[in-house]
Amino acid sequence: MTMISAKEFSGWLLERFADETQGVSLSREDINMLTGRQSFSLGYIHDIHYEVMRHGMAFVTDTTREMFYLVPISERPWRKQLEKHYEHDLYCNVLPLNKSG
């Protein structure tokens, strides 16, 4: 089996899951099996993410780098979401996060 490039794999993912509203998850073993690779680097994941981002999707991993997620990207600004769920002027009480610990 030949190894599939990040560009080829991202195209395969988009063909099958571009219309997915909830996203899908893949294990490290799933990616190895689907791409013909024995292992892959975080750079490979970054390349997949770069390719799918152009189509409104993100490809991200958990902190253990054992599970990977293809999820749709929302273009909804956070303030509009707060206005939708709370009183219109309530979001003005949101304070900036304190960066100094």
Image: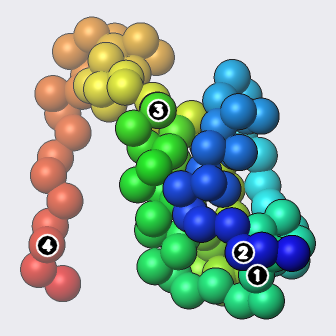
- The local crowd at label 4, few if under 14, some if 14 to 19, many if 20 or more residues have their Cα within 10 Å, is few
Of discs 3 and 2, which sits in the foreground? 2
Quarter of the image for residue 45 reads bottom right
- Residue 64 in the image: above or below residue 54: below
Judged by depth in the image, the label closer to the viewer, 4 or 3, is 3
Spatial CA distance of label 4 from label 3 is 33 Å
Instruction: Work out how far the residue at label 1 is from the one at label 3, CA to CA, in angstroms.
Output: 25 Å
Q: Where is mark 1, residue-wise?
A: 37
Dot label at residue 55: 3
> Earlier along the polypeptide chain: callout 4 or callout 1?
1
Q: CA distance from mark 4 to mark 2?
A: 44 Å
Q: Are marks 3 and 2 in contact (CB under 8 Å)?
A: no
Measuring 37% from the left and 25% from the top, which residue is drawn there?
75
Q: In which quarter of the view is residue 33 placed? A: bottom right
Instruction: Please state if 80 lies on the left or on the right of 66 as rendered.
Output: left
Residue type at numbered disc 1? Arg
Badge 2 is on which residue?
Answer: 3
Mark found first going from the N terminus, 1 or 2:
2
Residue occupying image coordinates x 21% and y 15%: 89
At label 3, the amino acid type is His
* Nearest to N terminus: mark 4 or mark 2: 2
Q: How is the image coloured?
A: rainbow
